[in-house]
Image (tube, rainbow, N blue to C red):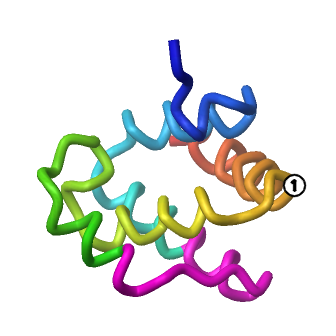
Amino acid sequence: MQKRWYDLDPTVSLAVSLLKNANEQTQLQCADYIITKSKNAGVKIRDNALNEAFNYILRRWYDKDKRIQEAFEYLKTAPLNLQKEIAKELLDVLQIC
């Protein structure tokens, strides 16, 4: 069975799971954080890949909002150590909610 990209690391997987179950406002705040943190770390995504993914049949839970989908594209593109760092910071916030 093929794992999803975020299931390759247990910390990232847990953060994504908690984010999935968070309310929409919290999801959007976390998305903004992921985008900002990723951009500040130099992570780049291809704009055409984002548009193609968003225009694709929206099957994934994080495709419901373009900003959340963009955040996940940044997180997916980030190196594993940055993914884990972001995930740990999200866990601190999401466990309070």
Residue 90 forms part of the magenta stretch: no
Residue in view at x 32 percent, y 60 percent: 25
Give x and y (percent) for residue 87. Answer: 70, 48
Q: Going by the image, does 52 lie left or right of 92? A: left
Q: So how many labels did they put on this image?
A: 1
Please name whichever residue, 29 or 64, is drawn nearer the observer in this view of the structure.
64
Q: Going by the image, does 82 lie left or right of 32? A: right
Tell me the magenta residue range. Answer: 33-49
What is the residue that sits farthest to the top in this orientation? 1
Residue in view at x 39 percent, y 41 percent: 22
Q: Which residue is disc 1 drawn over?
A: 81
Give x and y (percent) for residue 70. Answer: 41, 71
Please name whichever residue, 10 or 33, is drawn nearer the observer in this view of the structure.
10
Q: Amino acid at mark 1?
A: Asn
Q: Going by the image, does 69 lie left or right of 15? A: left
Residue in view at x 50 percent, y 42 percent: 97
Q: Secondary structure at mark 1?
A: helix
Characterize the magenta stretch by its predominant secondary structure: helix
Residue in view at x 69 percent, y 80 percent: 43
Q: Going by the image, does 91 lie left or right of 60? A: right
81 w.r.t. 43: above or below? above
Give x and y (percent) for residue 68. Answer: 37, 63
Residue 42 forms part of the magenta stretch: yes
Give x and y (percent) for residue 16. Answer: 53, 39
Within 10 angstroms of label 1, few (less than 14), some, or many (20 or more) residues? few
